[in-house]
Image (cartoon, grey):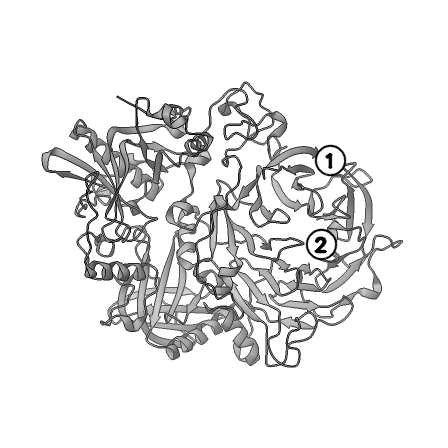
Amino acid sequence: MFVLKNVGKLIFGSSSQESMIELPQGQLYLVRPLSPKGYSELIFKDATARIRRTGQDYQYQLVVQRVYEEGEAELADEEGEDEELNALAAEKDEKTFLLDEALHFRVESREGSQKVLAWKDLSGDVGDVYEFVCDPSIKSAQVEAFERIARQCQYERKYRKPHSTASEADLQQFDFEEQPIPQASPIHSPTLARSIESSDAMFQLKNEANVSSKRDSTPSTASVLAEPEPEPYHEKEVKTQPAKQTGPPKPPAQPEPVEIFAMEIGELHFFDFPSGAFVLQDPSVTAQVSDIGNWNYWLHIASKDRQWLGIPVIADINPVFNFEFLSFIFNQFTEDGSAYSWLLRFKDTKTLERFQDGLMRALWEQLNEVKWTKVKEQDRQYVLDAFEDLNMEDAPIEEEEEEPEVEEEEEPEDDAPQSEHYDSEEEQEDVETAPKDPYTNSALAVGYKHDRSFVVRGPKIGVFKHTPKNHLEFTTNISKVETPKGASFVPKKVMLHNEDRNLILQNDTDPNKLYRMDLEYGKVVDEWNVHDDIPVVTFGPENKFAQMTHEPTFLGISKNALFRVDPRLSGNKLVDSQLKQYVSKNDFSAISTTEKGYVAVASNKGDIRLFDRLGINAKTVIPALGEPIIGLDVSADGRWVLATCRTYLLLIDALQKSGKNEGKLGFEKPFAADSKPQPRRLALTPEHVAQFHHETGKGVSFTPARFNTSKTNGESSIITATGPYIIDWNLDKVLRGSKAPYIIKRYEDTVRADDFKFGTDQNVIVTLPNWVNMVGKQHLKRPTRESIAGDFQRLSTPRRSSGRVGTRESGRYKLGRDEVVNSPY
């Protein structure tokens, strides 16, 4: 007789977590035909398989849960609290998989009426597959019904509509029965020996999936990205039967070129969503970049017998040049809202360089409406370097390592929205989470001196305490933000000041004034007129850690001026002697400072100016790449400048490596005329951009990126967000030139603001429209199909309990009314 551990997990309190169908008994294996880890591993000796709904429309999960023999569950409970926490986190006794066509879910009948369910292990090695071997007591009709429901769920996820609209032919595309399922080993079978040939095949397959084989290692003219001769266990239909929605779209009509910038021959590859790899489409195509007039430019790719694609050259194509693999990777967005990723591979470096020159000329002219020929040679090289996939100088030379697991004694993360309005007796389903006002969260300020964060929500400000367990605790609500004369307003920007005792506010409707809120009283006490003729675009601290001190002054910028604000002055607060005003409209947009008070100012034109003090010309002007800069941060020592554009980040090394100013920063001494700071453009890989767009229907739009900040440790991470994703970039991996050096976490709504907790890079404060929380870095994952789709089980599954459970140190502790973080405060 068998029982399920944590039976409460199966009592679904809402339709969003309903179990649709179940196979009550079987064994779960992980089979690795090509892996050195061993051929087969028994995961659960006794298990149940089911399909269940999630909290998202058209999203379903395949769930396999361990079944315990009677008495075994109680024995496991006695092993200690760690086991209890593991069970709560559903990591020990349950495997969940987003039911997507990429799994290639299929069913096979074997001798003796044995039924086997199989699906790909998307997070494992190439060829790895999970197998659920049904118990003989399971009837064939049950398995057939399970398979049919699985197809219907995949149809709904792919097309975002009910399966009732699908025909039998529509469901047939999710039939992968032609793929052979490898035999799972018996429970105590010896490890299967593998031949040298299969090892070589495994290596080749891995390299192809990761676009990392050398060109000269392939004996044929076909790309290393194309699929090789299939091994017996290798799914081969991906190339021959691409999914309808993810296949290459039909090209539009091609405009007549006014001038051709580049025309080169190469191989064309298409990123295939189900296989997660670039697949060869044509071994010989002509790629042409041309000017079609009125600052519009066109990329056209065709072969002798087929028109492959034609797209405008704009920033959204997210171009990446990889000279190691002679490749150019880019995105395509179609009128129906779909996103695709392509790769062009050229025969040699010279060919790629010529194509890069043509494409970057087109992109530059489109963004700036300035002819490329008018750009200085060193500025051209700066732009080209920024778009290359290259390592930074002085990058760490250690080998790539896995991220260490962060071991913290903290409660399992609970992403479900919570409210301060429920008492200790009600269940989670009764909690009010819908906002009762028309406003949403819009801005975040994180305290340096005291463990507090402040979140702007309309004319209100919520105050949150950082707990020792790295959570947020709602403290109080400043319910009315209003001028000293009693006029209510919504703060556009906020900045902590004077040892985190004051909050500097700006009213969007009156940009010439700033306001000081005394946080001890929770009200605005001063109104400062900065200057009658100079509106404030934004403002920043006197130096990196000024908010931890009594420093009264701070800096501000207008569209064409940089200045200091001193609240101690009578009348206008702008210090006239420290005003740097430009005749031309520089369109300044962001400002940041170092620990020594060096100043960086960015503009909507895309350039960055570095100053060692106010009132003089910039020591260094960093050329623009074309896109407006919406955010700016600088490392405490001034070595790294981090600019945020809509579709990418720009990391700039301000340290001079040669010449008479070697060892000096660009803030202190100007770079030589023939030398510019070395840039690195940080962007999501085109494959991930396409997958993000596939999931959300929206393109990339980053929030202002920030370094982690600490008085004792240097910068090690960068945090930003786009849509519902927060993205953490590992600075060491960025400098080493690692592919996709970032981890992500998806939320159910758009991230409005985010920043690190002061003094660490392990905790991030995240603000959504109606919710605020602190998330540990251990909850961010490498970008895979599953992490990009989101872990909706944890986001949606309520934990039923009444009253408080356990102690503060227990994993089952339930927050009470005075401890809940709720954004509508």
Q: Secondary structure at mark 2?
A: loop
Give the quadrant of the C terminus.
top right
**Residue under the image location 59 percent in, 54 percent down:** 704
Q: Check contact, mark 2 vs mark 1: CB within 8 A.
A: no
442 is higher (above) or lower (below) than 81: below
Circle 1 crowding by C-alpha within 10 Å: few under 14, some 14–19, many from 20: some
Mark 1: which secondary structure?
A: loop
Amino acid type at circle 2 is: Phe
| Residue at the image point whose x is 32% and y is 48% from the top | 122
Horizontal placement of 295 versus 43: left or right? right
Pick the quarter of the image with the N terminus. top left
Judging by the rendered image, the residue that carries numbered circle 1 is 480
| Location of residue 815 (image quadrant) | top right
Residue 336 appears in the rendering: yes
| Disc nearer the start of the sequence (2/1) | 1
Residue 261 at least partly seen: no
Give the residue drawn at x 35%, y 68%: 344
| Residue at the extreme right | 570
Q: Is residue 116 above or below residue 590?
A: above
> Quick one: which residue is furthest to the top in this view?
425
In front here: 222 or 469?
Answer: 469
Give the percent coordinates (x, y) of residue 597: 73, 62
Mark 2 packing: few (<14 Cα in 10 Å), some, or many (20+)?
many
Residue 19 vertical position relative to residue 730 in the rendered view, above or below: above
Report the residue marked by disc 2. 545
Mark 2 vs mark 1: in front = 2
